[in-house]
Amino acid sequence: MALLRQKDYPDGKFTLAFVGYGDEKDNTVIELTHNWETDGYDIGNGFGHLAIEVDDVYAATELIRNRGEKIIRDAGPMNAGTTIIAFVEDPDGYPIELLGPK
């Protein structure tokens, strides 16, 4: 995989890096987060969540809520950014991020 893009968020104290095998328009990519105040990651705390791009984060969140599923964070702008995101919980208790299209 190659580093496709990276952005620092000084107000949130984290960096996002996107890696993949080709342009994000045509390929799946992995988003990696580095939290600046974290000295290291171990097995057990190195994985946070999966993210899925959806057409409308607000509508997807409401659909999930109406099905009786757990919303961890309602739809709205991300910390220190403008991308619309939400977090929901899968049946096993893992968080899944919903993010709006770029």
Image (cartoon, helix red, strand yellow):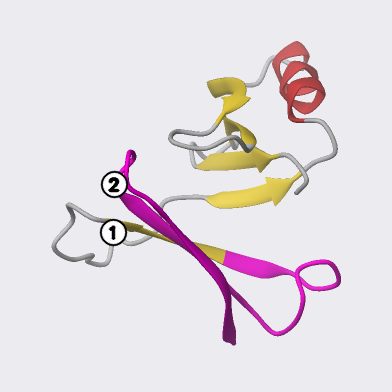
Q: Position of residue 7 (x, y in %)?
A: 48, 60
> In the drawing, does residue 75 fall left or right of residue 79?
right
Does residue 4 show up magenta in the picture? yes
The quadrant where residue 12 appears: top left
Q: CA distance from mark 1 to mark 2?
A: 21 Å
Whether the magenta-drawn stretch holds residue 82 is answered as no
Task: Identify the amino acid type marked 1.
Answer: Gly
Say if mark 1 contacts mark 2, CB within 8 Å.
no
- Residue plotted at (65% across, 21% down): 69
State whether residue 79 is above or below residue 67.
Answer: below
Is residue 70 visible in the rendered image? The answer is: no
Where is mark 1, residue-wise?
44
Residue, x 66% and y 69% (percent of image)? 29
Q: Residue at x 22, y 66 (%)?
A: 42
Residue 38 point in image, percent of width and height: 18, 56
Kindly give the residue lying farthest to the left in the view shown. 39
Among the 4 quarters of the image, the one containing residue 23: bottom right
SS under mark 2:
loop
Give the number of the disc on residue 58.
none
Q: Give the residue at x 29% y 46%.
A: 13
Q: Position of residue 71 (x, y in %)?
A: 58, 21
Q: Quadrant of residue 99?
A: top right
Q: Which residues are magenta?
A: 1-30
Relative to 4, is 102 on the left or the right?
right
The label on residue 13 is 2
Amino acid under label 2? Answer: Lys
Instruction: Judge whether residue 25 can be spotted in this image.
Output: yes
What crowding class fits label 1: few (fewer than 14 Cα within 10 Å), some (14-19), or many (20 or more)?
Answer: few
Q: Out of 47 and 79, give the one closest to the viewer.
A: 79
User: In the visual, does 41 lie left or right of 100?
Assistant: left
